[in-house]
Image (cartoon, coloured by chain):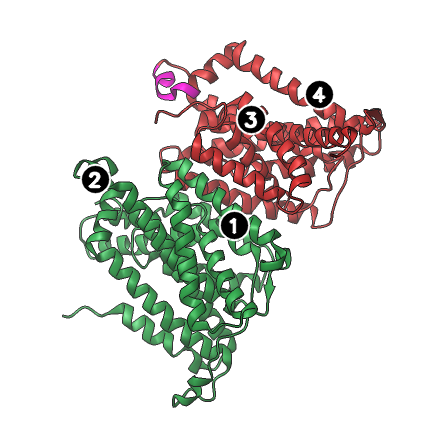
Amino acid sequence: MKRIPWTLVVFAVAFFVPWLGSRFYTFIATDVAILALFALSLNLLLGYTGLVSFGHAAYFGIGAYTSAIMMKTLGLPFWLAWPAAGLAGGLFALVFGFFCVRLTKIYFAMLTLAFAQIVWAVCFKWNDVTGGEQGMPNVPYPSLGWMAAIPGLDGFRVGDRFYLLTLTLVAIAVAALRRIVASPFGRILTLIRENPERAEFIGIDVRRYQLAAFSIAGIFAGLAGSLFGIFNRGVFPDFAYWTKSAEVLIMTILGGMGHFWGPAVGAAALTILNLQITAYTEYWPLILGSILILLLFAFPGGLVGTTVDLARRLRGGTRGNGGRDARRP
Amino acid sequence: MPEPSFIFGQFVGGLTASMFLFVTAVGLSLIFGVLRVLNFAHGSLYMLGAYLAWQIMNWLGPGPEHFWLAALGSAVVVAGIGAAIERLLFRHLYGREELYQLLFTYALVLVLADVCKIVWGTQQLSVSRPLSLSGGTTIFGTLVPHYNLFIIVLGPALALALWLLLHRSPAGRIIRAAVLDREMLGALGANVGWIYTGMFALGAFLAGLGGALVTPVKTIVPGMDVEVIVEVFIIVVIGGLGSMWGTFLGAVVFGQVLAFGILLMPRFSIFSVFALMAIILIVRPWGLLGRRLTR
């Protein structure tokens, strides 16, 4: 029996969300798609290279501000602003990462956090360019009039059209990420995660590879940030704050960093749960914190890791290791 | 050139801020020194200390010197909470990767923030200064409230007391041994488990005390936890994580950079402390007075 290409199935199903006709579903789906890309970009560092970045929101924020400034202040089109956001995220990650990869473990995490806070402070205070504390509201949508020419899309609201654009762009970006982790370059990153000393011994310039991974993760975070700024109808300093970095870490861990799709599942689960729970109670952080504690103690492999493990056990195979095989083969 | 009295005023203002933060920061630093974990929830314990001080003041009713009881009482309660968290939850994560420990402390930030909201609501609360320190004295043309003077004296006194505890007491000897090599200490028969609990409680006590002491000069609001953790985090990184005098120096530097940064770059003073922190991490990751970690 041939394996079902689940990835394609998911994207195909997701593509038809606007046809459900509900503004709410489209809203959730856009949110999930963008945050999934953000979480997947972090996992290139966390799950594949073994670098714990506590400041990944910096590049998300930089991407968001770059495209917002280009589209709102300079009036440039989206097809220029979006790649520019990725470029800006990648360039800043290259500069900051140059210093970060020189440090080990906890100090690496702290320096990424420090740089993210610098980005936040600049966004927060540079009123003339970033709008300061008030952020930049009313970032324009890209012009999507051309979509009306496509049969079947003419009746759609701008939110639905933006969703289709987002989904397409996210799909392309994720496909690129998938290619990267499956490439020889990606395998070297895994090797570095498993045993940096050994990688060094066989002649790999560990820092350079880590820096490359850091920059690539910055590019994709920037691309996600750009989309989020438009989706959110505004860009705010909070995008780069340390709590945002913690949020994306939680998504990644919740889904499971040992699996390529784990972070995307985590992003979807957390976003949908958030929307469901905030309808009943304002104490979402309390519930999120409790889920996180439960997760850390009971399901260290995350949702995907635990499911994979369970499926394996049900099939009567050997006992899995919490889906962490990608981390510890 | 600004007037000398103005410069002195900035200096005293910066020093006051430093010493307020030192009380909390040194707790974070001590916990890191022994447990090797960055406790994001330290700011939450600080906020808890502030709310509890207000609560105890409320229970005691108006009294000129009830503040001291409230501050001490709240710090003791926070220490108890810290010890409970360490005993019941945190110790199960010691064998795990740092990432999980960091995320656990972040989960505590989320939970404690909401617990405070549920118990005390979202309105601003404030505590009045103790009567004995309500006045002020003019020094070099700057009016310094007595309460601020008290804090400026308390900071070094606390540092000295902690130094005595760490370097001149039997308990301190064990703690310092735990900082150097906890495996060896365990092998030598010390009860490392209780040392950890004790350190966590002491750190929590200092966080709670810092939060309680700040109530007469700052209103108690939700969000003060996330705000203060960033500040004490910068302080301990500048001074050196795990180093007591380093934290003291870090606090002084932080206060002065902020106080004079406002004069030089009115808008970007907050930027300057983050930049300082990044530079320290790049040049000397273990901080000004910290010890280079061998592991």
Q: Colour of chain A?
A: green
Q: Which residue is mark 4?
A: B153
Establish whether labels 4 and 2 are both on one chain. no
Q: CA distance from mark 2 to mark 3?
A: 37 Å
For the stretch drawn in magenta, the main secondary structure is helix
Residue annotated with mark 3: B247
Q: Is residue B180 magenta?
A: yes
Q: CA distance from mark 4 to mark 2?
A: 53 Å
Q: Are marks 1 and 2 on the same chain?
A: yes
Is any atom of residue A267 visible in this view?
A: no
**Residue A306 appears at what percent x and percent y?**
32, 52
For disc 1, the marked residue is: A119
Residue B12 seen in the current view: yes
Q: Nearer the viewer, residue A192 or B173?
A: A192
**Residue type, mark 4 in image:** Val
- Amino acid type of the residue that numbered disc 1 sits on in the rendered structure: Val
Which residue lies under the disc numbered 2?
A199
Q: Position of residue B29 (x, y in %)?
A: 52, 28
The reply to whether discs 3 and 4 touch (Cβ–Cβ < 8 Å) is no
The secondary structure type at the circle numbered 2 is: helix
The chain that appears red in the image is: B
In the image, are marks 4 and 1 on the same chain? no
Q: Which residues are magenta?
A: B179-187
In the displayed structure, would residue A80 be above or below residue B32?
below
Q: Label 4's element?
A: helix
Q: Are marks 3 and 1 in contact (CB under 8 Å)?
A: no
Q: Are marks 4 and 2 in contact (CB under 8 Å)?
A: no
Q: Position of residue B15 (x, y in %)?
A: 68, 28
Residue at 49% of width from left, 72% of height from top? A76
Residue type, mark 2 in image: Ala
